[in-house]
Image (cartoon, rainbow, N blue to C red):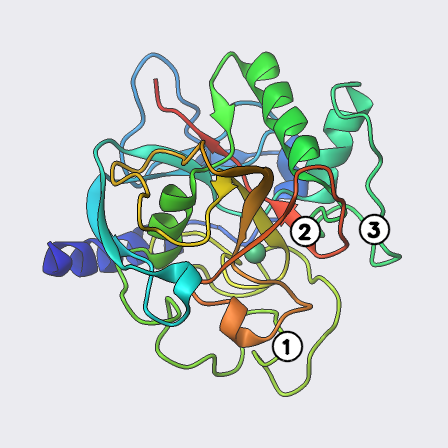
């Protein structure tokens, strides 16, 4: 399985890199050109890019598979356990941008004009949004497109972030330099968000899973994985006033930007490092 995934990831990179992927999500209203294959009657297949409307996030379909979720790095990430993702699903290639967020605000479905801290809007990842805000955003996309948008489950997030890798970071065992925006991911911390997709994507074509904006997922907080679902579904019992955030942020040290690190906030707290990315069911 691992061998298959690694080979698959390699093919994926070559597929993705052959396309003009650097175009910011904020340009979605422009000429989407050849890279957009909007899902129509057929269910899109793993590796396909999907955009359901001009202002919708670009999604990539990730394959079914299984992986070892968690680590022994902290008690919160233990025990490592096998999770099976039975069906492919679509997940945003980028963190939700301010442009995308502001489109939801303009439509009246998102009620809060998130604060950009003076770092700019447009192609910067939206921050200062609560879990409840993120839920309003996916409800907006669902209403707008007729497709089922949602937050990724924590298991789906880690599966997509790892993209078949097992090291601490999808690029290797050390944070290194030039891989992500975090405190310890470069010579000096930037201490603010950077435009989405400022670094190269992982093997599934996702940007900024590590660092930049912290990313809300659907799951309730639980202190460890002792009774966690193993089928890739969201864990919807536990401390549900608190929800999980993944991937660390510009404001965090590199040990929180690993593929397995977990954090949490109350569902109604807006924090200047917290954003999200969306997922969607294929059918
Ligand atoms: Ca991120």
Which residue is identified by label 1?
183
| Figure quadrant of the C terminus | top left
Nearest to the observer: residue 270 or residue 2: 270
Q: Position of residue 49 (x, y in %)?
A: 40, 36
Q: Vertical placement of 180 versus 229: above or below?
A: below
Query: SS for tag 3?
Result: loop
Which residue is identified by label 3?
116
Q: Quadrant of residue 45?
A: top left
Q: From mark 2 to mark 3, how far is it between C-alphas?
A: 11 Å
- Tell me if label 2 and label 3 are in contact, CB under 8 Å: no
Q: Which of the marked residues, 1 or 3, is nearer the chain's N terminus?
A: 3
Indicate which label's residue lies in the foreground, 1 or 3.
Answer: 1
Report whether 114 appears left or right of 7.
right
Answer few, some or many: residues within 10 Å of disc 1's Cα (few below 14, many 20 plus, some between 14 and 19): many
Q: Is mark 2 within 8 Å of ligand 1?
A: no
Q: From mark 1 to mark 3, how far is it between C-alphas?
A: 19 Å
Nearest to the observer: residue 219 or residue 239: 239
Indicate which label's residue lies in the foreground, 2 or 3.
Answer: 2
Which residue is identified by label 2?
274
| Figure quadrant of the N terminus | bottom left
Query: SS for tag 2?
Result: strand
Q: Which of the marked residues, 2 or 3, is nearer the chain's N terminus?
A: 3
* Residue at the image point whose x is 57% and y is 62% from the top: 248
Q: How many numbered circles are shown? A: 3
Answer few, some or many: residues within 10 Å of disc 2's Cα (few below 14, many 20 plus, some between 14 and 19): many
Q: Position of residue 7 (x, y in %)?
A: 16, 59
**Residue 260 shows up from this direction:** no
Answer few, some or many: residues within 10 Å of disc 3's Cα (few below 14, many 20 plus, some between 14 and 19): some
* Residue at the image point whose x is 45% and y is 33% from the top: 237
């Amino acid at each position: 399985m691992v061998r298959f995934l690694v080979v698959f990831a390699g093919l994926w990179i070559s597929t993705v890199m052959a396309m003009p992927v650097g175009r910011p999500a904020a340009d979605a209203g422009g000429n989407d050109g050849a890279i957009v294959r909007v899902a129509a009657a057929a269910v899109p297949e793993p590796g396909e890019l999907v955009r359901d409307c001009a202002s919708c996030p670009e999604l990539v379909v990730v394959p079914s598979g299984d992986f070892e979720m968690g680590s022994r790095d902290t008690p919160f990430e233990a025990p490592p356990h096998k999770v099976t993702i039975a069906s492919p699903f679509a997940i945003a290639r980028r963190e939700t941008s301010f442009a995308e967020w502001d489109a939801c605000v303009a439509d009246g479905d998102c009620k809060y004009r998130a604060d950009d801290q003076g770092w700019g809007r447009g192609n910067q990842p939206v921050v200062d949004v609560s879990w409840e805000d993120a839920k309003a955003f996916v409800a907006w996309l669902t209403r707008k497109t007729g497709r089922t948008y949602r937050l990724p489950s924590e298991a789906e997030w880690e599966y997509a972030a790892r993209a078949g890798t097992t090291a601490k970071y999808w690029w290797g065992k050390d944070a290194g330099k030039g891989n992500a925006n975090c405190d310890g991911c470069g010579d000096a911390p930037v201490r603010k968000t950077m435009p989405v997709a400022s670094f190269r994507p992982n093997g599934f074509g996702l940007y900024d899973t590590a660092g930049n904006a912290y990313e809300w997922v659907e799951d309730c907080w639980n202190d460890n994985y002792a009774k966690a679902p193993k089928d890739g579904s969201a864990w919807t019992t536990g401390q549900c006033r608190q929800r999980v955030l993944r991937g660390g942020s510009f404001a965090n040290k590199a040990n929180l930007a690993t593929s397995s690190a977990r954090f949490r906030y109350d569902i109604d707290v807006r924090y200047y490092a917290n954003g999200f990315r969306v997922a969607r069911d294929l059918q």
